């Protein structure tokens, strides 16, 4: 299986978080359907030139939050829809990630909120949201 996952080490966001977020997007858009098997940790780590532990953390986060299930014989597979977090939980998680990224980047909270508001406005005005 070939996944479209890209990690930018210059982004200022932990690589495991980038992997997790991209996989969640692939799942929520249907690009990864329930039952789809994710690549083995070592394979994805090799493909992304990352340590296996980095990919393992992303997979662990996905499993802890109900996005995937791991079974020894089957590997890591996308969970059924009923097992997935609701929109409110996803929004809270995204807001938490945004707050952490704001702190890690050393951005003023007011500036971060203004940037988020501008991004939302841009999406709405383009009809993409």
Image (tube, rainbow, N blue to C red):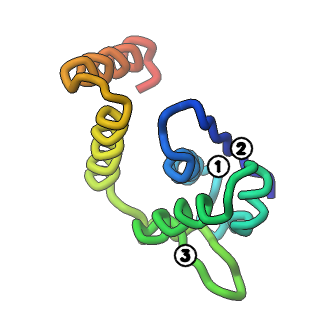
Q: From the viewer's perspective, is residue 107 above or below residue 75?
A: above
x and y, in percent, of residue 89 in the image = 29, 55
- Kindly report which numbered mark, 3 or 1, lies closer to the viewer in this rendering: 3
> In the rendering, which numbered label is found on residue 31?
1
x and y, in percent, of residue 52 in the image = 67, 64
Quadrant, the N terminus: bottom right
Residue located at (26% from left, 49% from top): 92
- For the residues labelled 1 and 2, the Cα–Cα distance comes to 10 Å
- Give SS at disc 2: loop
> In the rendering, which numbered label is found on residue 45?
none
Residue 113 placement, left or right of 40? left
> In the rendering, which numbered label is found on residue 4?
2
Residue picked out by circle 3: 69
Q: Label 2 near label 1: C-beta < 8 Å?
A: yes
x and y, in percent, of residue 86 in the image = 33, 57
Mark 3 surroundings within 10 Å by alpha-carbon count, few (fewer than 14), some (14 through 19), many (20 or more): many
Q: Which quadrant would residue 129 be assigned to in this image?
A: top left
Q: From the viewer's perspective, is residue 118 above or below residue 73?
A: above
Mark 1 surroundings within 10 Å by alpha-carbon count, few (fewer than 14), some (14 through 19), many (20 or more): some
Q: Label 3 near label 2: C-beta < 8 Å?
A: no
- Give SS at disc 3: strand
- Give SS at disc 1: loop
Dot placed on the residue nearer the N-terminal end, 3 or 1: 1
Dot placed on the residue nearer the N-terminal end, 1 or 2: 2
Residue located at (46% from left, 64% from top): 61
Q: Label 1 near label 3: C-beta < 8 Å?
A: no
């Amino acid at each position: 299986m070939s996944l479209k996952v890209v990690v930018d080490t210059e982004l200022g966001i932990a690589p495991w978080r980038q992997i997790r977020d991209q996989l969640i997007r692939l799942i929520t858009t249907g690009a990864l359907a329930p039952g789809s098997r994710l690549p083995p940790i070592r394979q994805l780590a090799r493909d992304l030139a990352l340590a296996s532990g980095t990919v393992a953390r992303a997979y662990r986060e996905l499993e802890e939050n109900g996005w995937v299930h791991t079974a020894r014989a089957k590997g890591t597979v996308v969970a059924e829809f009923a097992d997935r977090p609701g929109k409110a939980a996803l929004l809270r998680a995204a807001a938490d990630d945004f707050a952490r990224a704001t702190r890690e980047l050393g951005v003023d909270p007011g500036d971060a909120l203004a940037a988020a508001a501008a991004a939302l406005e841009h999406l709405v005005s383009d009809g993409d949201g």
